[in-house]
Image: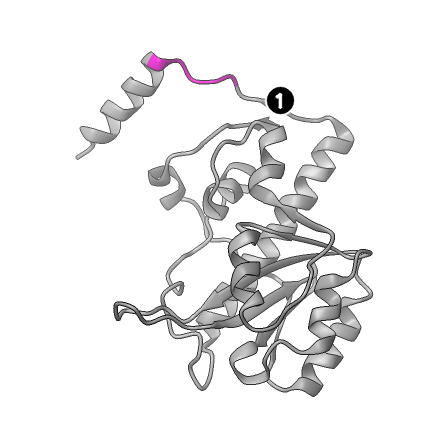
Amino acid sequence: MIIRRSIDKEEVKDMPKAVFPGQIHVVQTPQEAERAVAYLKSCSILGIDSETRPSFTKGQSHKVALLQISSEEHCFLFRLNLTGLTLPVIMLLENPGITKVGLSLRDDFMMLHKRAPFEQRACIELQEYVRTFGIQDKSLQKIYAILFKEKISKSQRLSNWEAEVLTPSQQQYAATDAWACLNIYNRLQELKRTGDFEIAPEATKEEVITENDKLTNRP
């Protein structure tokens, strides 16, 4: 496999959509959170992400509303605006024996720390991890497109994550983001194990200018 260093968003736009293929579980009570964590503790590696209700008013902000934690088969959507950050979830995030993979984790944890204090352990930041494979893009959408030739939809990003009921589209969006982090990591680990990859050479300055001209002149 040839790993490209970066990809243009116009190219990503035409790719087929990536969709989490497993089961989605919406967690709305502390009891459900406890049961979810009991399953997640049996996994050695998990994908994580979070969502916050967007604010369209200057000076107004919201606490993180949703924490998504995914294995390959199951994704749990913890509705923190209903449950708070419960002790079992905190213990999972602090567990040094379970690897948590995410993108822009610093921002996620900064928001989560506003709900409760904890010390996250065994975390892998994909933006740093992909650099060793030559990938320079930092967005989840572009990294996923480079490795899988599929696009991750961002259509639900600014939806209301504190709504009384999360729509199927919101659930699928949230689950796909967390699972995609895990999927990227597993793919790179497999390529590292087999050595079956090459990093594409860097584009020359002339090639970059030519490509930009093509995009500018596109009808």
Front position in the image: 75 or 28 = 28
Q: Is residue 169 above or below residue 86?
A: above
Q: Describe residue 184's horizontal placement relative to residue 96 as left or right.
A: left
Q: Quadrant of the N terminus?
A: top right
Which amino acid does the dot numbered 1 rest on?
Glu
Q: Where is residue 164 in the image (x, y as percent from the top left)?
A: 44, 86
* Residue 14 seen from this side: no
Residue, x 41% and y 71% (percent of image)?
Answer: 53
| Residue under pointer 1 | 198
Q: Describe residue 41's horizontal placement relative to residue 9 as left or right.
A: right
Q: Is the magenta stretch mostly helix, strand or loop?
A: loop
Q: In which quarter of the image is the C terminus?
A: top left
Q: Residue furthest front?
A: 117
Q: Is mark 1 on a helix, strand or loop?
A: strand
Residue, x 57% and y 60% (percent of image)?
Answer: 109
The part of the chain drawn in magenta is 201-205
Task: Decide whether residue 57 is among the magenta residues.
Answer: no
Front position in the image: 93 or 199 = 93
Q: Describe residue 217's horizontal placement relative to residue 117 as left or right.
A: left
Q: Position of residue 182 (x, y in %)?
A: 65, 52
Front position in the image: 43 or 17 = 43
Task: Decide whether residue 204 is among the magenta residues.
Answer: yes
Q: Where is residue 75 in the image (x, y as percent from the top left)?
A: 64, 67
State the image quarter where residue 85 is shown: bottom right
Q: In this view, does 88 lie above or below 51?
A: below
Q: In this view, does 29 lie above or below 142?
A: below
Residue, x 59% and y 80% (percent of image)?
Answer: 84
* Residue 157 seen from this side: yes
Classify 10 Å Cα crowding around label 1: few (below 14), some (14-19), many (20 and above).
Answer: few
